[in-house]
Amino acid sequence: MRKLSSLMLAVVALTSAVGAFAQFAKPEDAIKYRKNALFVMQQHYARVGAMAAGRVPFDPKAAADNIAIAESMSKLPWAAFGEGTDKGDTKAKPEIWKEPANFKEKAEKMQMEMTKLAAATKTGNLDNVKAAFQAASGSCKACHDDYRAK
């Protein structure tokens, strides 16, 4: 039942994201949407990062709750990388639109690592969280290195 619920949530998130791009009145709206989705994801992800790094005490429930939000948000920004959103207030590099298959692969890898991290937080074991957090961070870094301007 839990897997079915997760699958349904993923389907809703994906269909919402696809529909969201169609609803953007202008490219600037899509850029704002993706930046805000990534910002919210990063904020919740960083809370778990602080626990993994020992900067704040590990709280298994808070870790699981925050990563559940980050995992959900990780599915949203991709629909907002459409045509015309390569210009304006963005740090997105032109390579995103020149290498869409590789960009998509890195986005999917990050989402997969976020799912693994969500599972690790549910174990309540800090060592599991640290390992999964490191892998997720590596997937984020790989995409930023290739596709995000400094």
Image (tube, rainbow, N blue to C red):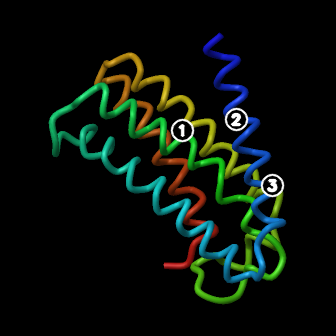
Mark 3 vs mark 1: which is more N-terminal?
Answer: 3
**Tag shown at residue 31:** none
Side of 60 relative to 122 (left or right): left
**Tag shown at residue 114:** 1
Up-down: is 18 above or below 55? below
Q: Quadrant of residue 132?
A: top left
Q: Amino acid at mark 1?
A: Met
User: SS at mark 3?
Assistant: helix
Q: Residue at x 73, y 39 (%)?
A: 12
Q: Residue at x 60, y 75 (%)?
A: 32
**Residue highlighted by disc 2:** 10
Up-down: is 144 above or below 24? above
Query: Where's residue 9, x and y in %?
Result: 67, 33
User: SS at mark 1?
Assistant: helix
Q: Residue furthest top?
A: 1
Q: Residues within 10 Å of mark 2 (few under 14, many from 20)?
A: some
Q: CA distance from mark 3 to mark 2?
A: 12 Å
- Report if the CB atoms under discs 3 and 1 are less than 8 Å apart: no
- Report if the CB atoms under discs 3 and 2 are less than 8 Å apart: no
Mark 2 vs mark 1: which is more N-terminal?
Answer: 2
Q: Quadrant of residue 42?
A: bottom left
Which mark lies nearer to you, 3 or 1?
A: 3
**Residue highlighted by disc 3:** 18
Q: Amino acid at mark 3?
A: Val
- Report if the CB atoms under discs 2 and 1 are less than 8 Å apart: no
